[in-house]
Amino acid sequence: MIEVDGVSYAYRTGEADAVPALRELDLQIEPGQLVAIIGHNGSGKSTLVKLLTAVLYPTEGGIRVDGVPVDREHQWEVRRKVSVVFQDPDDQLVMNRVEDDVAFGPENLGLPRQEISERVASSLEELGLTEIKDRLVEDLSAGQKQRVAIAGALAMRPRFLILDEPTSLLPVPVALRLISTVRELHRRENMGVLHVTHSMSEAVLFDRVVVLEAGRKILDGTPAEVFRHVERLREVGLDVPLAASLAHRLRARGIPLSGDVLDAADLRRAVSAATGARAPSEHPG
């Protein structure tokens, strides 16, 4: 379990000046959970990622990963448990060949050669990269590079995988395939997954959504629970899924839509129930 207890963090800009990035944040993430973390720029998402991976350490409060405190003394133990994939894969792909890059993390853990080989082969297979394991990284597409980065993180055998906006540079179809791959890995490996994203259409694919604003947690729940708060989300500069937005507008006009609306299918069902019409999918032929 990841336990974030009363954590604050401030960036120092001088001897006396400090810029707060997180403020008294409490958060618990169970093993095996799929969690999307959303918030606009400056909400504290990137700082939280750095704290969870022992790149930074709390100014106040504490973080524990499976009981291990996130501090300088335990940073390598924490990094064995928590792996991260960044927005731009070029920021973390360090070797020339695909197979060598996937092996880089396990090699730094000082694992036996046989175990490294087994982990690399397994991770390449999981991400569908076995056939291109000898390719040069520089020759890969953006989507392939991102899969190599995930394979490298997976080879570390983490308890938790953090995706720090890994789809923002990808075309939508490629991004959705990547999310589908991560969900399948989660199912097979029972990893906790934290997906930091600006995409509401991606956030609804996760089991839980956490909303940060000015370093504080303001909403936390299932996608249906969080995206009910249309006005609150808009107040902090966030959008909601299109179907949820349309449902909100229809309700404001007096149409009594029931249930939670997150996608087009939900909206069709809700409108059909409210108007007594049959949903398009129910028509014969």
Image (cartoon, rainbow, N blue to C red):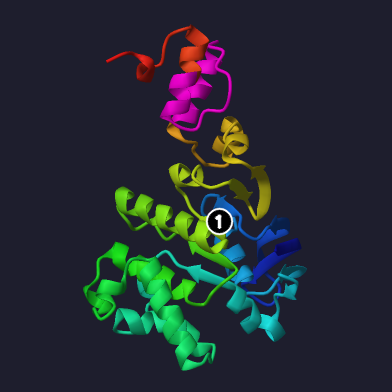
Q: Tell me where residue 2 appears, x and y as whole percent.
A: 69, 64
Tell me if residue 277 comes above or below residue 133 in the rendering: above
Residue tagged 1: 42
Which residue is drawn at the image coordinates 61% and 41% (left, top)?
Answer: 222
- Quarter of the image that includes the N terminus: bottom right
Q: Residue furthest left?
A: 139
Which residue is drawn at the image coordinates 41% and 28% (left, top)?
Answer: 264
Q: Nearer the viewer, residue 239 or 1?
A: 1
Which residue is drawn at the image coordinates 47% and 73% (left, top)?
Answer: 153
SS at badge 1: loop
Q: Tell me where residue 72 appears, x and y as whole percent.
A: 68, 83
Determine if residue 55 is in view: no
Q: Nearer the viewer, residue 15 or 36?
A: 36
- Quarter of the image that includes the C terminus: top left
Q: Tell me where residue 250 appears, x and y as whole percent.
A: 49, 17
Q: Tell me where residue 282 appears, x and y as whole percent.
A: 38, 16
Which residue is drawn at the image coordinates 42% and 74% (left, top)?
Answer: 122
Membership of 249 in magenta stretch: yes
Location of residue 150 by image quarter: bottom left
Q: Would you say 143 lies left or right of 3 here? A: left
Tell me if residue 267 comes above or below residue 202 in the rendering: above
- Residue type marked 1: Gly
Determine if residue 120 is in view: yes
Q: In the image, which residues are magenta?
A: 243-269
Tell me if residue 107 comes above or below residue 39 in the rendering: below
Q: Would you say 28 lies left or right of 267 here? A: right
